[in-house]
Image (spheres, helix red, strand yellow):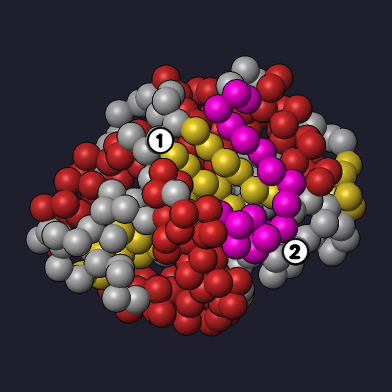
Amino acid sequence: MLFQIKSYLNFLWNSKNQHGVHSPFVFDLVTKCFYDKKSKPEYSILKKYRKSLLENKDFIEVTDFGAGSRVFKSNKRRISDIAKTAGISPKRAELLFRITNYFQSENILEIGTSLGLATSALSLGNENSKITSLEGCPETIAVTKKMFQASGFKLIDTNFNNIEFSSYLNNLKLETLNNKEQILDLIYFDGNHSKTATLDYFELLLPTISNETVWIFDDIHWSEDMEEAWKIIKNHPKVTVTIDTFQWGIVFFRYEQEKEHFIIRA
């Protein structure tokens, strides 16, 4: 906790808003997407889905393959408690919707479904999107599928996979090397908050990038390990533009952009 407080104070000291941004690409993203304050009809759908989870008092047995929970002491957890403490926040869900909508991302991968709070934002961002969402825990993904369907989301365009992440990503890498149609427009990384796993996923997914690809890493300041992983990602030769919003690290591979790193309050 002390580490995160120090990291956040450092973020506040170094961060800027749109007035400190000189890249036209990033300036437009910040002003037209990050800071878009207009109400959207999709926000009420996100709110309704969250409410359905917060009202669910059932218990499930969670299989945790990641860095573990700082909140829960037991693997037997109430669904409403998971939604309250472990899922994406309402503000971040709205921002994720806006980012997906802004870039009109079609081929999307989510690493770490949890209860589908982020999945719902991704699916609403572009009605033509096709989403593959990976979750290691069988009971969690079973609940998510059921709740997603009950809430009226289109399951036909959302492929939920109960699978170990590295296994799926290794297969995807092989497929991509043989088939350029495996290019992914957006990847949301929220599955394993450890340096080793994050960097492994980064390397495995590099064959899927295009000039328009957007990658979003959750919890880049979760630990010293994650901050080290973020520094390595920023310095990778294929990465051109990065944005640190404290909660997220957003990565672009646009060849026409000069290499720049931004710290933005969003």
Q: Nearer the viewer, mark 1 or mark 2?
A: 1
Of residue 212 and residue 172, the one placed in the foreground of this image is 172
**Residue 105 position in % (x across, y down):** 37, 38
Q: Residue at x 72, y 35 (%)?
A: 144
**Quadrant location of residue 63?**
bottom right
Characterize the magenta stretch by its predominant secondary structure: helix
Q: How many marks?
A: 2
Residue type at tag 1: Glu
Q: Which residues are magenta?
A: 155-172
**Quadrant location of residue 151?**
top right
Q: Which residue is mark 1?
A: 106
Q: Which residue is mark 2?
A: 65
Is 112 within the magenta?
no
Q: Residue at x 69, y 22 (%)?
A: 149
Regarding residue 198, the answer to whether it shows in the image is yes
**Quadrant location of residue 12?**
bottom left
Query: Helix, strand, or loop for circle 2?
Result: loop
Q: For this view, does 96 lie left or right of residue 49?
A: left
Q: Residue at x 30, y 69 (%)?
A: 238
Quadrant of the image for the N terminus? bottom right
Residue type at tag 2: Phe
**Residue 154 position in % (x across, y down):** 58, 21
Q: Residue at x 40, y 29 (%)?
A: 126
Of the numbered discs 1 and 2, the one sitting upstream in the chain is 2
